[in-house]
Amino acid sequence: MSTARAGGTGVRDVLTAAGVRHGLRRWMYRGGRPNGIARALNRLDARVLSSGRLPVQRAAALEVPGRRTGEVVPVPVVIADHDGERYLVAMLGERTNWVRNVRAAGGTAVLHRGTRTPVRLVEVPVAERAPIIKRYLDLAPGARAHIRVDRRAPVAAFEPIAAEHPVFRVEPLPAE
């Protein structure tokens, strides 16, 4: 079995269906930013996820106002569970628009999957991120092309990359 990851491309990786999907995901997010095709697919995914009609329990559309325009652009996210808490992980890292928007909004956001649930997203300190990122990779196959540690690696292998991938704990907002 090849050990090539997001940073490398082994011959075996390229010649398998999984390798083709991995390469396609890397191409769609070259430079850590979605290209036009990825943006269109993300909009479609967010619309489908927000409808609540899919039996996908770990996915939702994240809605947060844009830091420049104030316009809400739904983004599909995978909600990782770890030690009884729920988390969002930025697979593309610090430059991800939704991360910048969440920070600008003071963590206030909405998770939409059938119904809109107002939440507060609290950034997790770097020292606590590794096991959450590992769990996230178990749940989000599409993210594996963007996080350069194999999902089967021990938690310690995630510590060097933890600062590269913001993680937010999902906290429900009290009803008003």
Image (spheres, rainbow, N blue to C red):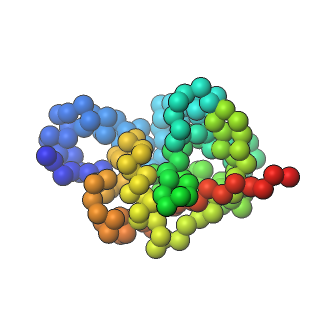
Q: Position of residue 104 (x, y in %)?
A: 70, 59
Q: Is residue 36 at all visible to an observer of this figure?
A: no
Q: Position of residue 124 (x, y in %)?
A: 55, 67
Number of disc labels:
0
Nearer the observer, 100 or 35 = 100
Relative to residue 163, is residue 156 drawn left or right? left
Name of the residue lying farthest toward the bottom: 127
Q: Is 40 drawn above or below residue 4 in the view shown?
A: above
Q: Which residue is found at the position 39% from the left and 50% from the top?
A: 137
Relative to residue 37, is residue 16 drawn left or right? left
Q: Is residue 81 at all visible to an observer of this figure?
A: yes
Q: Position of residue 154 (x, y in %)?
A: 29, 63
Q: Which residue is found at the position 63% from the left and 36% from the top?
A: 113
Q: Which residue is found at the position 41% from the left and 54% from the top?
A: 135
Name of the residue lying farthest toward the right: 176
Q: Position of residue 37 (x, y in %)?
A: 47, 31
